[in-house]
DNA sequence: TAAATACATGTTATCGCTTACACATGAAAT
DNA sequence: ATTTCATGTGTAAGCGATAACATGTATTTA
């Protein structure tokens, strides 16, 4: 059996409550402090966190539920969350829905059961509206990152996807491009809808021609981008391609180069995300960078505000990406 | 305040222990079962996991400590771990040492404090020997993935890196190559030493010439591979390059192509890892694939064996990679 | 030196659950 | 009808911590 606070008290010749106070940083007499230190080392005592949580109804821990823990995009967000959590003295633990197809809402039990003080749900998949509604009823601290199904009532944070694409359109427009093609992504991903909407709105605003046959879908992989570009190459008339992710943009670039089409001289291309690879390819890819860390921080801040009983705006908070100009576009 | 088992008992007109038994799947009379079901729904009862863990000294949860949660290599391993854990009815929670430079051993407190029943430490960084020794003294279920500092006394699982490189050497030798260059990786990574050792041993065995100037280090990034290859290009005489990771191999490929050196006609190149990108590049890269999922499963199995009190071999368990032949090498 | 104050420590109830044990109930065996 | 046994349920004692309250000791002040 592990030693308990009671054992420590016995060995140090004092009482449980003194031990508890000492452990929690309250002042004790110098002599008892030393005795306690010795006792704790001798017994190799570690406090039982479960007992503590039971009586305190508090865990000092937040849960982060991610659909795919190895998604590289989440790493920046997680860094942001952890930065805030560390400052607040909280621990982060991660739950992954990766292999088992558990739904996010199924992790809410962690909250009910007292395993965590709050939860951040992190996923760029499009979310189920029923699940979102269910979450709105949860009287516990909760923050969403990613799609919020355009409904209010939940504290959520996301990239302003529409704005990012709009920036790309504007940039191409400034370079003189009037007809641009678009490589979209898989429909189950949250950002897809907003990126397309941003494209359409900005193009309309700038009175650019929008042709449905200049829009193709991809699965957001490199290979998908390659294939989408091949498909797109059967149409003509556009002078630039906007890919809705850098990975597809790079695949598309490969298809273009394979066809002997020079980038950017004969075709301009831009991506979205600013992944590391984007600066390596040739030509280096113009794209927009997502403020991932800020997103994570904002979500964590909102969560802690809720944990501490403050009022938060239960609505969506968006962060604008920033344009990163490299060498994949040319002036017309 | 949340409803407790006591509230449920009151509403269902029975006693705490009956509720507890019902919740734990023991048989109760049909009538009480129905009453309990109703009471639980009415009250929206969720059992307090902390109280339960306190009295049971058991969490049904294992902790997975990873240095960088977004490392794509870990995703396969994690899938393996989760598969075994799910089968055993355990939950996995992840702890990340990402942002804060916490050492792995500092997560052992989770075990002492009763937060988890066992821990898997997952990292491909080279491990600190002092930390490893400290872990050997821990009388709790523990499994290591990655470097085990060549010491026994810990249950650990790893890729057989030496064997992987040896396979590559053998393959090149079979193709007629006798003089090969090698792009190593960063010294703080665990596999580096073993991969180099595998290279040297197999080359010696096959009586191939090993020249120090044909060995350069890289940081295992694409750009690092590019630079390493440039450095290597100042030397001559070798007919093939073994890169110690696919990402560097792809960078090296870029450098070669930039110099107008045709792959595989003028230079053969192989990588290590079999990342997705390796089959996309041109020419598709010959490499070795790591059995990541198996590694994860083996670690989890060893951990559960320990949790269940079985004896396990407290030593290193290695899994051999398999050669994946594509088109980046030519017969001499 | 006695009274007033501050500070450190001990006593005890409590958090919500599981479980050993005792007890009640009803069916099966005598 | 009585005894036996199985089965379901209640009582009560912990699990290991915190914290309100009471108490004791040291320090300051009159």
Image (spheres, coloured by chain):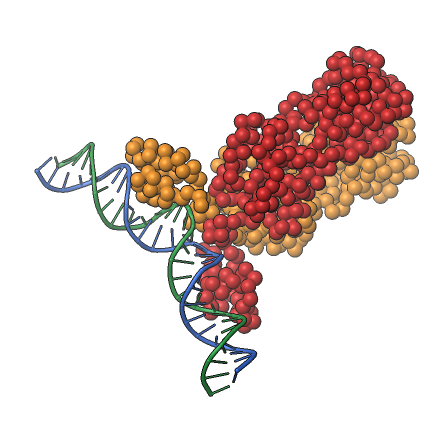
Chain colours: A red, B orange, C green, D blue
Quadrant position of the C terminus of chain B in the picture = top right
Q: Position of residue B114 (x, y in %)?
A: 50, 50
Q: Pick whichever, B302 or C25, lies toward us.
A: C25
Q: Pick whichever, B194 or A36, lies toward us.
A: A36
Residue B27 visible in the snapshot: no
Residue, x 30% and y 41% (percent of image)? B14
Residue, x 41% and y 43% (percent of image)? B3
Residue, x 49% and y 68% (percent of image)? A12
Is A91 drawn above or below residue B232 in the view shown?
A: below
Q: How many marks?
A: 0
Q: Pick whichever, B319 or A19, lies toward us.
A: A19
Report which quarter residue B284 is drawn in: top right
Q: Position of residue B157 (x, y in %)?
A: 61, 41
Report which quarter residue B18 is drawn in: top left
Report which quarter residue B179 is drawn in: top right
Q: Pick whichever, B244 or A33, lies toward us.
A: A33
Is A38 drawn above or below residue B217 in the view shown?
A: below
Quadrant position of the N terminus of chain B in the picture = top left
Residue, x 61% and y 51% (percent of image)? A89
Left or right, B14 with respect to A45, comes to left
Q: Position of residue A145 (x, y in %)?
A: 63, 35
Left or right, A246 with respect to A298, comes to right
Q: Position of residue A245 (x, y in %)?
A: 74, 27
Is A90 drawn above or below residue A11 in the view shown?
A: above
Residue A311 visible in the snapshot: yes
């Amino acid at each position: 059996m592990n030693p308990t606070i009671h054992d420590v008290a016995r060995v140090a010749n004092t009482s449980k409550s003194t031990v508890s106070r000492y452990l929690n940083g309250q002042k004790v007499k110098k002599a008892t402090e030393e005795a306690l230190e010795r006792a704790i080392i001798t017994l190799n005592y570690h406090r039982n966190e479960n007992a503590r949580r039971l009586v305190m109804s508090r865990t000092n821990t937040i849960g982060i539920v991610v659909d795919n823990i190895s998604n590289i995009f989440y790493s920046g967000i997680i860094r942001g969350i952890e930065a805030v959590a560390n400052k607040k003295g909280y621990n982060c633990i991660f739950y992954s829905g990766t292999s088992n197809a558990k739904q996010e809402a199924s992790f809410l039990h962690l909250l009910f059961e007292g395993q965590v003080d709050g939860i951040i749900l992190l996923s760029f998949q499009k979310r189920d509206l029923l699940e979102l509604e269910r979450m709105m009823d949860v009287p516990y601290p909760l923050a969403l990152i990613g799609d919020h199904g355009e409904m209010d009532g939940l504290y959520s944070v996301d990239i302003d996807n529409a704005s990012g694409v709009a920036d790309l359109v504007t940039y191409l427009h400034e370079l003189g491009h009037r007809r641009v093609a678009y490589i979209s992504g898989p429909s189950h991903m949250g950002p897809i809808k907003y990126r397309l909407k941003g494209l359409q709105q900005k193009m309309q605003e700038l009175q650019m021609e929008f042709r449905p046959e200049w829009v193709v879908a991809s699965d957001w992989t490199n290979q998908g981008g390659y294939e989408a570009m091949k498909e797109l190459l059967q149409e003509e008339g556009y002078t630039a391609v906007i890919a809705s992710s850098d990975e597809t943009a790079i695949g598309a670039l490969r298809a273009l180069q394979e066809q002997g089409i020079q980038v950017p001289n004969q075709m301009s291309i831009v991506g979205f995300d600013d992944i590391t690879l984007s600066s390596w390819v040739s030509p280096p890819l113009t794209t927009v960078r997502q403020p991932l860390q800020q997103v994570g921080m904002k979500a964590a801040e909102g969560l802690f505000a809720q944990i501490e009983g403050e009022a938060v705006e239960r609505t969506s908070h968006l962060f604008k990406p920033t344009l990163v100009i490299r060498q994949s576009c040319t002036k017309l």
